[in-house]
């Protein structure tokens, strides 16, 4: 029989994961919908439990075949776990993967980017080009359910790691590239190498101390006269330009 009370212990415990402090303390989060679940399973993750409606036969079969704890709930219970009015089940409770070690390959860094949609899209961009993704204090929690939805499964294809300082990146051999509205180099002239692209919040950009301390500043040429771009859009342009193969030097 499905759980028909929103005060059920398992439902309440899962719903608490919408709080950043709870996710951090428990190192767990929630993923919603069959696509994200499929991406997590393809990456070798096994959910700790699955919340699904009673008539969700595919999820019932999946839970049985994978020996995953299945918790059947009514629509109200699923909505409470999801934190949305129109949830799309199933919802999986998972352990947050351990962050990778940086040191090889390029990394896209959300430096204080607070919008969950932007952060999720940036993770998707990083994964699409084979980059790692970094985030700093003040950025939206990359493992928040909203960010996971925006990332569309990219979290399980790109390493997600906390960045504490420019010095941390530079000690690992990264060339730190600060994106600024004007006065920087065009991305196309940056030489290949181990690069960390720093993207600031849309409203305020990168802190002046970060831009001043970076290895170089880069600016997207925009002859149309627009002052700035959405943080995720800017990320996509810069990462695309830096990922282009460079012609051999004479």
Image: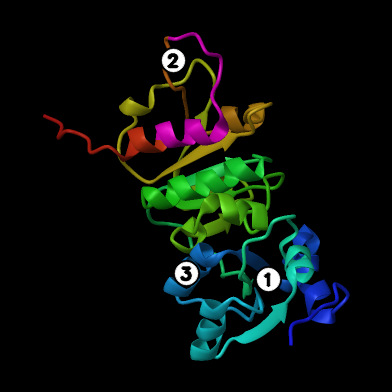
Residue situated in front as seen by the camera: 224 or 170: 224
| Position of residue 146 measured from the top left corner of the image (x, y, whole percent) | 65, 52
**Residue, far right:** 7
Q: Secondary structure at mark 2?
A: loop
> What separation in Å lies between label 1 and label 2 (alpha carbons)?
41 Å
Residue 81 is situated, as x and y percent measured from the top left of the image, at: 74, 67
Quadrant of residue 162 in the image?
Answer: bottom right
Q: State yes or no: discs 3 and 2 in contact (Cβ < 8 Å).
A: no
Return the residue found at the far front: 55
Residue 73 x, y percent position in the rendering: 73, 77
Magenta-tinted stretch:
224-238
Instruction: Name the residue carrying label 2.
Output: 222
**Image: 123 above or below 250:** below
Report the residue marked by disc 1.
28
**Residue found 67% across the figure and 60% down from its top:** 87
Q: Quadrant of the N terminus?
A: bottom right
> Within the image, what quadrant is residue 222 found in?
top left
Asked whether, in this view, residue 110 is left or right of residue 105, the answer is right
How packed is label 1: few (under 14 Cα within 10 Å), some, or many (20 or more)?
some
Q: Badge 3: how crowded within 10 Å, few (<14), some, or many (20+)?
A: few
- Which residue is found at the position 64% from the left and 84% from the top? 70
Residue 171 visible in the current orientation: no
Q: Which residue is mark 3?
A: 38
């Amino acid at each position: 029989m499905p759980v028909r009370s929103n005060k059920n212990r398992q439902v309440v415990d899962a719903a608490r994961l919408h709080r950043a402090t709870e996710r951090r303390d428990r190192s767990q989060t929630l993923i919603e919908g069959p696509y994200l679940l499929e991406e997590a399973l393809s990456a070798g993750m096994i959910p700790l439990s699955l919340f699904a409606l009673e008539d969700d036969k595919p999820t019932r079969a999946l839970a049985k075949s994978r020996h995953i704890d299945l918790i059947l709930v009514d629509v109200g219970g699923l909505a409470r776990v999801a934190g949305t009015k129109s949830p799309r089940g199933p919802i999986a409770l998972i352990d947050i993967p351990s962050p990778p070690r940086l040191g090889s390959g390029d990394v896209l860094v959300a430096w204080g980017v607070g919008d969950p949609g932007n952060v999720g899209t940036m993770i998707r961009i990083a994964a699409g080009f084979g980059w790692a993704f970094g985030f700093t204090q003040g950025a939206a929690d990359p493992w928040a359910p909203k960010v996971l939805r925006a990332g569309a499964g990219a979290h399980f294809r790109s390493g997600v790691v906390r960045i504490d300082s420019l010095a941390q990146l530079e000690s690992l051999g990264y060339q730190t590239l600060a994106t600024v509205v004007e006065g920087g180099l065009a991305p196309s002239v940056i030489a290949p190498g181990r690069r960390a692209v720093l993207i600031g919040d849309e409203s305020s950009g990168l802190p002046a101390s970060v831009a001043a301390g970076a290895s170089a500043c880069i600016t997207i040429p925009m002859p149309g006269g627009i002052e700035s771009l959405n943080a995720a859009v800017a990320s996509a342009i810069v990462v695309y330009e830096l990922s282009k193969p460079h012609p051999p030097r004479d």
